[in-house]
């Protein structure tokens, strides 16, 4: 890599631009007029867009945009140019990375002029308002990360109109209301929705999804996990439903997600037994059921999963650990079985508490409709990586 001229581009941006077909370079040589003209038109539009943006930036404490002056937009801090896929003489703005700039402001309509943009990273700023509908013009946009800002309003449906979108991160904002089912029909690889105010139950009518990571955590969904979760079967590896006010029983269909490596449903109001189908999830490494109202046995089929490394099921009402489940140490599995109703184990719930918990028949159990965010959470969870507000490497 070191011998190429694109060393000015951070590695991740480079990889994305290559993925979407840009010939990345930082050289500025043009050898014909057509290319020069096309370059000028595209960069002129970018110039208009970036100047409009700068006008609605009200605080820039690190002086990130202080060199956003004049027509040479490729020299602006955080702006990355590349050669156009089909016209290698034309230079275009292909990436914008303002991560951690702590900028306060809005996104103006003129951002729609950045029609060659493949990557937009705004993590950890103070942008507020909504995403302008003109962003639908960004037909090459591959990665959109607006996490950890102050965006509000309903789910930003403009992202549904982005045909090339592959990575969507809108976590740590103040979006509210329902999630559109179409979100899960898009060819996305990663969907980070956590730490917003979404209130929908997970949509029932979702199509086959391509996502490998979906993080719903810390929203106010309510309702049950629907059987349509099976639509993620061919791709999903990490599913995080921590603290989403989910109730009802776990659907058998959860066991259809044969690629799952991480499943975390902790801090909800899930009842009933663990579906035995989960014993088929041979890639499972991290399984967390903690802080729910699950009951019945902890099935041995789960405890013998070949890749299981960490199995947490504390703060439930399990009354039996089947077979080897009672001695996970012997399998080298990190576990937490505290605060259940396990007669042989230390640090369990009182007899009175255990007797008060009535068994649940999942066939009869009516799925509770989304209520007004009535999640009762008793202690702080310590999260693993996907919940951090910094983008994955
Ligand atoms: C440059 O673009 C303008 C406007 O599209 C056009 O009128 C002009 O002929 C082009 N010039 C060259 C040299 O291609
Ligand atoms: C495009 O060309 C015009 C006319 O030569 C010039 O004024 C303008 O600054 C150029 N824009 C960019 C972004 O290079
Ligand atoms: C930003 O620029 C202003 C004005 O030029 C200066 O006072 C301030 O110290 C700069 N801040 C940083 C973080 O460089
Ligand atoms: C852009 O920056 C490079 C390196 O900092 C500099 O050599 C070049 O003159 C600048 N280009 C323009 C047009 O300002
Ligand atoms: C390049 O050309 C191909 C085929 O005409 C087209 O599908 C693609 O969208 C073009 N790419 C860009 C970046 O315009
Ligand atoms: C969309 O992009 C094209 C250039 O590709 C531009 O001419 C047009 O003005 C843009 N539309 C909006 C709404 O920004
Ligand atoms: C659970 O989510 C709610 C918002 O939906 C939040 O206020 C609360 O702090 C979260 N609980 C934990 C343990 O993170
Ligand atoms: C095991 O998983 C739990 C819940 O996700 C987590 O809190 C704990 O830190 C993990 N333990 C190890 C050793 O990875
Ligand atoms: C758990 O298994 C280990 C090793 O197989 C054994 O030494 C230990 O006595 C067992 N503990 C219990 C409580 O059965």
Image (cartoon, grey):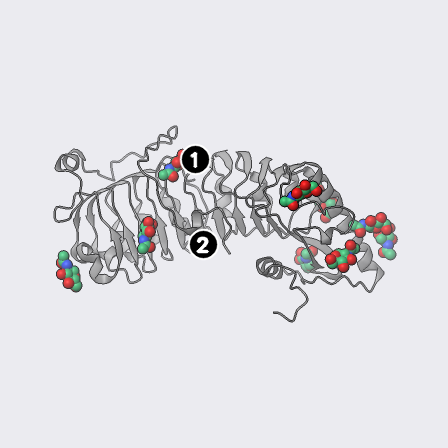
Residue furthest top in the image: 372
Describe residue 246's horizontal placement relative to residue 138 as left or right. left
Give the class, few, some or many, for how many residues have Cα within 10 Å of label 2's Cα (few <14, many ≥20).
some
Describe residue 121's horizontal placement relative to residue 31 as left or right. left
Return the x and y of residue 23 as percentages of the image width and height: 67, 63
Q: Is residue 339 visible to the viewer in this orientation of the structure?
A: yes
Q: Is residue 255 visible to the viewer in this orientation of the structure?
A: no
Residue furthest bottom in the image: 3
The numbered mark at residue 212 is 2
Whether disc 2's CB lies below 8 Å from ligand 8 is answered no
Q: Quadrant of residue 373?
A: top left
Q: How many marks?
A: 2
Residue 194 vertical position relative to residue 24 in the rendered view, above or below:
above
Return the x and y of residue 183 as percentages of the image width and height: 50, 44
Residue 181 vertical position relative to residue 278 in the rendered view, above or below:
above
- Point out the tag, 2 or 1, that comes first from the N-terminus: 1
x 69%, y 48%: residue: 115
Give the class, few, some or many, for how many residues have Cα within 10 Å of label 1's Cα (few <14, many ≥20).
many
**Could you say whether the residue bearing mark 2 is in a helix, strand or loop?**
loop
Q: Are marks 2 and 1 in contact (CB under 8 Å)?
A: no
Where does the N terminus fall, quadrant-wise? bottom right
x 35%, y 48%: residue: 264
Residue at mark 2 to residue at mark 1: CA–CA distance: 21 Å
Whether disc 1's CB lies below 8 Å from ligand 7 is answered no
**Could you say whether the residue bearing mark 1 is in a helix, strand or loop?**
loop
The numbered mark at residue 226 is none
x 50%, y 35%: residue: 174
Q: Quadrant of residue 339?
A: top left
Return the x and y of residue 29 as percentages of the image width and height: 78, 63
Ligand 3 quadrant in view: top right
Return the x and y of residue 371 as percentages of the image width and height: 37, 29
Disc 1 designates what residue? 200
């Amino acid at each position: 890599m070191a011998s190429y001229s694109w060393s000015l581009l951070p590695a991740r941006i480079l990889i994305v631009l290559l993925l979407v077909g840009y010939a990345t370079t930082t050289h500025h040589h043009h050898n014909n007029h057509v290319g020069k003209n096309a370059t000028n038109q595209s960069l002129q539009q970018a110039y208009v867009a970036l100047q409009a943006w700068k006008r609605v930036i009200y605080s820039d404490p690190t002086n990130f945009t202080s060199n956003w002056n004049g027509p040479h937009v490729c020299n602006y801090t955080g702006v990355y140019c590349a050669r156009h896929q089909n016209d290698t003489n034309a230079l275009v703005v292909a990436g914008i990375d303002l991560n951690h700039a702590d900028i306060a402001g809005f996104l103006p309509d003129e951002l729609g002029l950045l029609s060659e943009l493949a990557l937009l990273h705004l993590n950890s700023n103070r942008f507020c308002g909504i995403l302008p509908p003109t962003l639908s013009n960004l037909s090459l946009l591959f990665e959109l990360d607006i996490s950890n800002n102050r965006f509000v309003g309903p789910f930003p449906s403009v992202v549904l109109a982005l045909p090339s979108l592959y990575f969507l991160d809108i976590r740590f904002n103040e979006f509210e209301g329902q999630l559109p089912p179409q979100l899960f029909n898009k060819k996305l690889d990663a969907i980070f929705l956590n730490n917003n105010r979404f209130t929908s139950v997970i949509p029932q009518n979702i199509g086959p999804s391509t996502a490998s990571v979906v993080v719903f955590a810390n929203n106010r969904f309510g309702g049950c996990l629907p059987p349509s979760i099976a639509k993620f079967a061919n791709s999903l590896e990490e599913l995080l439903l921590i603290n989403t006010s989910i109730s009802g029983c776990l659907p058998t269909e959860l066991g259809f997600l044969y690629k799952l490596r991480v499943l975390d449903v902790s801090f909800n109001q899930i009842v009933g037994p663990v579906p035995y189908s989960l014993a088929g999830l041979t890639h499972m490494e991290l399984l967390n059921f903690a802080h729910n109202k699950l009951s019945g046995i902890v099935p041995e089929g789960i405890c013998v999963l070949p890749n299981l490394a960490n199995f947490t099921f504390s703060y439930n009402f399990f009354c039996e650990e089947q077979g080897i489940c009672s001695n996970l140490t012997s399998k080298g599995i990190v576990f937490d079985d505290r605060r259940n109703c396990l007669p042989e184990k230390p640090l369990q719930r009182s007899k009175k508490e255990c007797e008060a918990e009535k068994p649940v028949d999942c066939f009869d159990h009516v799925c509770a409709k989304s209520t007004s965010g009535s999640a009762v959470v008793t202690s702080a969870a310590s999260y693993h990586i996907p919940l951090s507000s910094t983008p994955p490497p």
